C-alpha cells in the first residue's frame, strides 16, 4: 500500500498532477542554460545537497551534508562501445525538471512497519553534441542520503562499455573496502589493494557496499539500487588521483566462472542503477537510513504476498532421522523452517539432478512431518542443477517445499544480473522463498520480489571471523540489504562470547535467520546449560520499528527493534572490554517494562568460555542501562511491558 503527496512547488509548466499526488506527465519544456550552470537537489530536512554541474561541456557532481563536503566535484558519464563518452565534453542541456515527492509504503517485511519515501528530484535532459545521443541524469536528495542515475533517452539500442562516474572524497577520508567474502579493511580511497585472478576482474577493486568516514564525520555507505539488465558495480582506486574512486562495471563473475562480458547491450530508453550515498552525522545513522535503497527500487511486483513468511531456520544433517529431529527441535524452539543443505541430492558439484534425494533421506516423509507440525522445508541447490529452474521449482512446489537456497551464485555480469532476477521471478511464480548464497550483493530488489528474502555476500560465521569484523558489518554490508550470516550459538570455534552471537539476532537485519549453525538439537538437550535459548525462542526476524541506540564505528554497536509491544536490544563489542551507557528513551513513556538481561559474566580463558549471566529488572523510558561487555562480548535484552 502506498500513499503519496507530490508537491506542485517547482514543477514545470505543463506537468499534470492528480488529486492523489501522482505525476501523469511532464512537458518537454526547453530551457535556456548558460554554458556553465548547475542544479541542486536538497533533502526535505535541508541537510543533504547533491549538485550536478556543467562546466565547459563536462558533467560533474558533488555532495554536501550540512556544511561539510562529502564529495568534491567528480566526473559523470557513460562510455558507449563506439567510443562515445557521454558527459565528458560538448554536452548541452535540453530540458530541466524538478519536484518533491512525499509518500509512505508498507513493506511485506522489513526493519520498520512503514517506510517514508520523501525526496526532492532534479533532472537534466542532455544532448551529446558530437554523437547526437540524448540522455538524462537524475538526482535525488533524501534526509537519509542522495542518489543519481543515468537514462539513455533515444529509442533503439545502445551498447555500454563503461561507466565514468567518479567519487572524489575530501582529504582525511578513510574507506573500509572488502572483496568477495573478505573482511573489511581501512584504507585511503587511492589505496585499495590489488586483487583478482586471471579468471576474475582484477585491479584495485572493492565490492559494494563500501563504508566511508570523512574525518570526524559525517559517515557514508556507497551502494547501488535498482540494478536491472546491467552489470554489478564495484569501485576502483584511480592511479595518481588522491581520494578518488571510479565506478567499475564487472566483466566477469565474482566466483571465477562464466562468460566474460566486456560490454552490455540494452534496449533504449534505458535506466542505469542508482549510485547511492547513504549518509549520517553519526555512524549509527547509516544503520537507520538503510531503507534508502528500498525507496530507490521498484515497488513490489507480486500481486499476492500473503505466503511470504520470514523466519528462523535450522540446518539438519543429511538423514531422515535428522530431518524429523530438526522438525521437533524447530517446534520446541519456535523456529519456522528446517533446511537440507549441500549433498541432499548428491555431490553438489557433479550432480545436476536436484530432484532425487540420497538414499539416507526419505524426503516426502520429512516434508509431510514438517508440514503437519507447521514447519517449512528449505532445500539447497547448486547452480549447476539450475538449467531448468521453472520445471525444478514447479516440482518443489508440488512436494510442499517452502523455499530454496541457491549456492555458488556467479553474480557480476549483465547476464548474471538477469539470471538472478529470473530465478527470483520463477521462485515467486511457485510461491517459493529464495536465499542466494556466496558472493551475491543486494540492489534493493527484496522490495520488488520480496520472496528473495536473503542473500550472503558477507564474511559470516561459516568462517568464524573476529569480533571487529562483526562490528563493521551493520554499517557496511548490512546497509546494502539482508544478509545470511548464520549465527553460531555455543560453538567452541567462535572468536566471540555467546552473548555476542545472541546480540546478532537484533543488531543484524536478517529476515531469514539461520540459527544454531554447525549444531545438532542434542547439543542443547540440557536447556539449563544454554540460557540464550530463551532469547532465540522469543526473537522474531522482522520488525515494526528499529533504532540504533549506541554506536562507535569499529568499537561497538547497539540496536533496538520492536515487534508488537516487545523490544529486543542487542549490543556487540570488539576485542576491547567496555561498558556502554544506553538510554532507553525509545520505550513508551509512562509504561514500565521488565528487562530480561543476558550479560557477559566474568571473562573466560577464551571469549567462547565466557558464561552468560541472566537477570531481570524493571525499567522505563527514563532508565539508562549500563551495558558491560567483555572482550568480543555482547549483551541481549528483552523488554516486555508490565501488564
Image: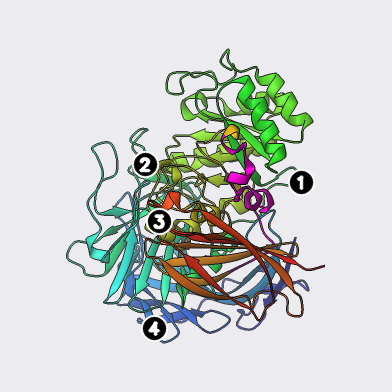
Image marks 4 and 2: residues in contact by CB distance under 8 Å: no
Outermost residue, top direction? 359
* Residue 550: image location, x then y, percent: 51, 72
SS of the residue under disc 1 = loop
Mark found first going from the N terminus, 2 or 3: 2
Mark found first going from the N terminus, 1 or 4: 4
Q: Residue at x 73, y 75 (%)?
A: 588
6 vs 329: above or below: below
Q: CA distance from mark 4 to mark 2?
A: 35 Å
Magenta residue check for 533: yes
Residue stretch in magenta: 523-547
Residue under label 3: 467
Local crowd size for mark 4, using a 10 Å CA cut-off: few (<14), some (14–19), many (≥20): some
Residue 254 disc label: 2
Mark found first going from the N terminus, 3 or 4: 4
Rendering quarter of residue 211:
bottom left
Residue under label 4: 68
Residue 306 disc label: 1
Amino acid at each position: 500500500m502506498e500513499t503519496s503527496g507530490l508537491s506542485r512547488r517547482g514543477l514545470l509548466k505543463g506537468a499534470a498532477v492528480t488529486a492523489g499526488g501522482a505525476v501523469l506527465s511532464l512537458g518537454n519544456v526547453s530551457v535556456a542554460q548558460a554554458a556553465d550552470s548547475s542544479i541542486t537537489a536538497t533533502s526535505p530536512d535541508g541537510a543533504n545537497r547533491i549538485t550536478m554541474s556543467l562546466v565547459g561541456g563536462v558533467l560533474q557532481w558533488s555532495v554536501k551534508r550540512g556544511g561539510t563536503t562529502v564529495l568534491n566535484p567528480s566526473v559523470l558519464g557513460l562510455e558507449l562501445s563506439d567510443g562515445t563518452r557521454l558527459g565528458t565534453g560538448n554536452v548541452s542541456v535540453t530540458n530541466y525538471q524538478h519536484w518533491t515527492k512525499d509518500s509512505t509504503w508498507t513493506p511485506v517485511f522489513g526493519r520498520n512497519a512503514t517506510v517514508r519515501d520523501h525526496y526532492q528530484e532534479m533532472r537534466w535532459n542532455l544532448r551529446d553534441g558530437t554523437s547526437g545521443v540524448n540522455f538524462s541524469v537524475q538526482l535525488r536528495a533524501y534526509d537519509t542520503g542522495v542518489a543519481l542515475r543515468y537514462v539513455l533517452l533515444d529509442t533503439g539500442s545502445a551498447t555500454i562499455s563503461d561507466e565514468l562516474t567518479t567519487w572524489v572524497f575530501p582529504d582525511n577520508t578513510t574507506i573500509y573496502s572488502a572483496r568477495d567474502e573478505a573482511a573489511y579493511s581501512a584504507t585511503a580511497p587511492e589505496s585499495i589493494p590489488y586483487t583478482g585472478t586471471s579468471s576474475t576482474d582484477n585491479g584495485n577493486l572493492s565490492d559494494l557496499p563500501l563504508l566511508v568516514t570523512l574525518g570526524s564525520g559525517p559517515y557514508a555507505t556507497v551502494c547501488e539500487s535498482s540494478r536491472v539488465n546491467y552489470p554489478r558495480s564495484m569501485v576502483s582506486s584511480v592511479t595518481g588521483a588522491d581520494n578518488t574512486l571510479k565506478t567499475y562495471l564487472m566483466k566477469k563473475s565474482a566466483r571465477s566462472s562464466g562468460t566474460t562480458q566486456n560490454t552490455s547491450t540494452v534496449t533504449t530508453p534505458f535506466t542505469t542503477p542508482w549510485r547511492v550515498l547513504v549518509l549520517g552525522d553519526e555512524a549509527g545513522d547509516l544503520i537507520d537510513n538503510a531503507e534508502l535503497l528500498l525507496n530507490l527500487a521498484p515497488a513490489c511486483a507480486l500481486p499476492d504476498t500473503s505466503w511470504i513468511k520470514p523466519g528462523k531456520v535450522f540446518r539438519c544433517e543429511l538423514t531422515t532421522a535428522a530431518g524429523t529431529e530438526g522438525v521437533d527441535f524447530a517446534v520446541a524452539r519456535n523456529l519456522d523452517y528446517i533446511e537440507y543443505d549441500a549433498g541432499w541430492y548428491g555431490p553438489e558439484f557433479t550432480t545436476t539432478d536436484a530432484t532425487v534425494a540420497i538414499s539416507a533421506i526419505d524426503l516426502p516423509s520429512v516434508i509431510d512431518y514438517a508440514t503437519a507440525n507447521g514447519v517449512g522445508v528449505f532445500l539447497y541447490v547448486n547452480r549447476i542443477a539450475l538449467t531448468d529452474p521453472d520445471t525444478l521449482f514447479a516440482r518443489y512446489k508440488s512436494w510442499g517445499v517452502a523455499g530454496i537456497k541457491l549456492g555458488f551464485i556467479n553474480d557480476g555480469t549483465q547476464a548474471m544480473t538477469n539470471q538472478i532476477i529470473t530465478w527470483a521471478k520463477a521462485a515467486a511464480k511457485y510461491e517459493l522463498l529464495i536465499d542466494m548464497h556466496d558472493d551475491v550483493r543486494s540492489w534493493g530488489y527484496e522490495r520488488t520480489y520480496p520472496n528473495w528474502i536473503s542473500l550472503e555476500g558477507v564474511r559470516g560465521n561459516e568462517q568464524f571471523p573476529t569480533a571487529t569484523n562483526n562490528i563493521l558489518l551493520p554499517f557496511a554490508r548490512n546497509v546494502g540489504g539482508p544478509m545470511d550470516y548464520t549465527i553460531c550459538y555455543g560453538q567452541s570455534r567462535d572468536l566471540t562470547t555467546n552473548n555476542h552471537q545472541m546480540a546478532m539476532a537484533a543488531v543484524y537485519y536478517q529476515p531469514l535467520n539461520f540459527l544454531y549453525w554447525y549444531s545438532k538439537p542434542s547439543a542443547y538437550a540440557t536447556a539449563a546449560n544454554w540460557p540464550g535459548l530463551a532469547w532465540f525462542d522469543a526473537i522474531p526476524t522482522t520488525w515494526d520499528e528499529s533504532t540504533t541506540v549506541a554506536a562507535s564505528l569499529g568499537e561497538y554497536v547497539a540496536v533496538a527493534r520492536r515487534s508488537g509491544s516487545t523490544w529486543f536490544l542487542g549490543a556487540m563489542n570488539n576485542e576491547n572490554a567496555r561498558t556502554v551507557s544506553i538510554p532507553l528513551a525509545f520505550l513508551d513513556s509512562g509504561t514500565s517494562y521488565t528487562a530480561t538481561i543476558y550479560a557477559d559474566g566474568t571473562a573466560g580463558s577464551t571469549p567462547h568460555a565466557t558464561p552468560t549471566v541472566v537477570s531481570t529488572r524493571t525499567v522505563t523510558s527514563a532508565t539508562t542501562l549500563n551495558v558491560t561487555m567483555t572482550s568480543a562480548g555482547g549483551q541481549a535484552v528483552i523488554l516486555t511491558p508490565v501488564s
